[in-house]
Image (cartoon, rainbow, N blue to C red):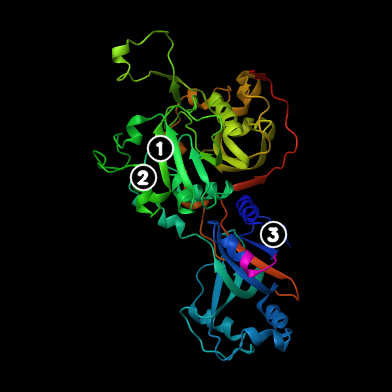
Amino acid sequence: MPELHAIASMFGVTVKFLEQPKGEPYAIVELSSEDDARKLASRSVLIRSITELWAHAGEIDDVCDQVKKFPAKFWDAYGGADQSFKFSVEVFGKRKVPREVKVEKIEKFDFLPLNGPIKLENPDHVYHLIEYYGIVPNCIPEKPHAVFFGRWVCDGQRFLKSHLALKTRKFIANTSMDPTLSVIMANMARVHKDHLILDPFVGSGSLLVPAAFFGAYVLGTDLDYMLLHGKAKPSRCNEKRRADDESVRANLQQYGCEQRFVEVVVADASLPLWRAEMRFDAIITDPPYGIREATERIGTRKTYEIPGHLAAQHIPSKVSYCLRDVMCDLLNFSAHHLCLSGRLVFWMPIYNEDFNEASLPRHPCLKLITYSEQALTKHSSRLLITMEKTSEPDRLHFICHRRHHMPSCHLQLTRSGTDISQAQKPDPKTRKVDIGHMFSALDGTGAHRESLRRHYFISRSIGIENKLLFQETFPGMEVTVLL
């Protein structure tokens, strides 16, 4: 539920869980109003729909008995002759139910005092009947685990998965982020209208697209000159060369967000080009791991001077940029250039057997909010980490002693402790990630209304393992203060 918590904190919405989620594709929460429900759904890509919960039980007959006890005055807002309606029956965890069976279930509610016309398209009210049979496909019970009934309020933003699909995007690269994950990252960063968002490893700008779509101004940096100028080797199958107009700007123009594009700059993330007073509302990024994209920074093993007449055309050489140093520089940069309460959202690879929470990146100015795990192979995963700036750095600068601040065990991906960026590349067949399987489309909505409290049934997608961690104190970090 980290995405839900992030959106709720962004809009100032209080969400009270009446039942703690235990892996089901739904959650029963208490909200103060329908407006709060619409705010949550207006940003979430994992919420399928929100329904005002009126009754729920183990069987449909018990649900009908609960609804029959509603006072007659309750139906004044819904049963008028001018209030059109329709019924929707959904079954989760079971094969498609025949239409005749659905009609039979709907007819059980023929006692409702609904005097308005039936309207199948754009009705005033939609009444949802949901039957939940569990999430084990090979063990379907005869009777549902739970039955929910209520009034539909709103849908989530699941259309963004297809609207921002990489298949139809103008400019992509080898590591362009899946649109669902990109939207989740924007939500975790609490991207809002007119925010200034930076991606220091921008690549094809896939993380900037949802941020701009939500109304933020976006910019990024990357060391790959050829990619930023649309001259790199094409990433699509059977494509010999890129189109002349491929660029990050073209992507934003494709989705009507060109006015939110600031710029992308060829720059080295290890040598920030920004002035000290530059501040960003959020930083969202996916640093290179050294597998599909090289981890490099500007540098040289030899010291030499460049003749003045060659300086303008000189292309700096590059050296290896290990993942440990990438993470350390990213945290230091965020501590200096994020606004207070601004968020850093990034991915970090791990080796499953060696991972523990103590090995998560840390910084005295950044608070760990949450991390979520995405499985890559049987032995490795990557974490989506969200951190929030809580204080300004002391003095002028903090310089991390990388050797002490982020030991190799913090970023292990192999048994020997070798940095992933230096490790041997695994078989491509073992690196496939079935995003469609991870974010499987789930059905579900539901419904119970009390005098002054409104309970909402939120149907959501399952697939990412979410772990919430609030950390008030941080281990000490050895620093050098430059005066």
Q: Earlier in the sequence, mark 3 or mark 1?
A: 3
Is the Cβ of the residue at disc 1 closer than 8 Å to that at disc 2?
yes
Q: Residue at x 74, y 75 (%)?
A: 450
Residue type at mark 2? Arg
What residue sits right under mark 1 in the picture?
Answer: 264
Q: Which residues are magenta?
A: 31-36
Q: Nearer the viewer, residue 332 or 121?
A: 332
Q: Is residue 9 left or right of residue 453?
A: left
Name the element at disc 3. loop
Which one is closest to the eye, mark 2 or mark 3? 2
**Which marked residue is nearer to the observer: mark 3 or mark 1?**
1
Q: Are marks 3 and 1 in contact (CB under 8 Å)?
A: no
Which residue is more in the foreground, 270 or 327?
A: 270
- Name the residue that disc number 2 marks: 249
Q: Quadrant of residue 415?
A: top right
Mark nearer the N terminus (1 vs 2): 2
The amino acid sitting under disc 1 is Val
- Residue 481 rendering spot, x and y as whole percentages: 66, 19
Would you place residue 131 above or below residue 179 in this image? below
Whole-number angstrom distance, CA of label 2 to CA of label 3: 37 Å
Instruction: Please name the residue that numbered disc 3 is placed on.
Output: 15
Report the residue at 38% width, 55% height from top.
Answer: 256
Residue 318 % position (x, y): 41, 19
Q: Is residue 455 above or below residue 218?
A: below
**Left or right of residue 209: residue 351:** right
- Label 2 element class: helix
